[in-house]
Amino acid sequence: MKTLLFRSFVGICFGALVMVLTCFGVIGFGDVTSLDSGIFVKNAIGCLLCGWFFSTATILFEIEKWSLLSQTILHFLSVSILYFLLSFFVGWIPFSLKGLVTGIGIFLPFYVIIWIVFYLYFRYQVKILNDGLDKRGN
């Protein structure tokens, strides 16, 4: 439960950071002088929820009796379904076949790249831990 609460907090904070940086970018680099409060709140809630479910869904990777493939498939399905439902509702992706195909075309490469980066990072962490155990054993 403690892990879930911590990941929820981190995910919500990350979603808030993404929202603030996006607003800075839109205002700083776009042709926008003011923000519509209704649209802002809708997008902010979307970013917070997105950060929350992406961060908490990583708990699936801690179920040791499942293979990495099973964990990845379940994680991918859960976050992609939630993401696309949220994206259609908030308006990030138009509710059409073209919008869905474009959204998938953007989502999939990002998911794969982020998955590979985390895989390599945790593989490196395991190597460091194993090297430390080897040194202690000698």
Image: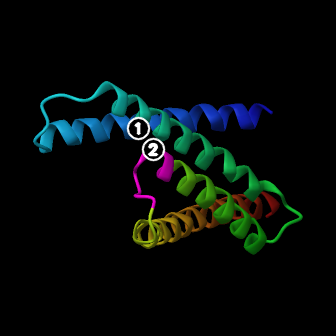
Q: Is residue 93 magenta?
A: yes
Locate the N terminus by quadrant. top right
Give residue 137's position: percent from left, percent from top: 82, 61
Give the left or right position of residue 31, taking residue 132 as reference: left
Q: Amino acid at mark 2?
A: Val
Category of crowding for the residue at label 1, using alpha-carbon neighbours closer than 10 angstroms: few (below 14), some (14–19), many (at least 20): some
Left or right of 72 in this view: 44 = left
**Which residue corresponds to the image point at 48% horizontal and 33% vertical from the top-left?**
45
Q: Which mark is residue 53?
A: none
111 is higher (above) or lower (below) than 36: below
Residue sitting at x 40%, y 71%? 98
- Magenta segment boundaries in residue numbering: 87-95
Label 1, on which residue? Answer: 43
Give the label on residue 90, or none.
Answer: 2
The quadrant the C terminus occupies is bottom right
Q: Position of residue 66 (x, y in %)?
A: 85, 67
Q: 99 or 14: nearer the eye?
A: 99
Please determine whether, in this image, residue 12 is positioned above or below residue 137. above
Farthest-out residue, right = 65
Q: Percent position (x, y) of residue 62?
A: 78, 55
Position above or below: 58 against 90: below
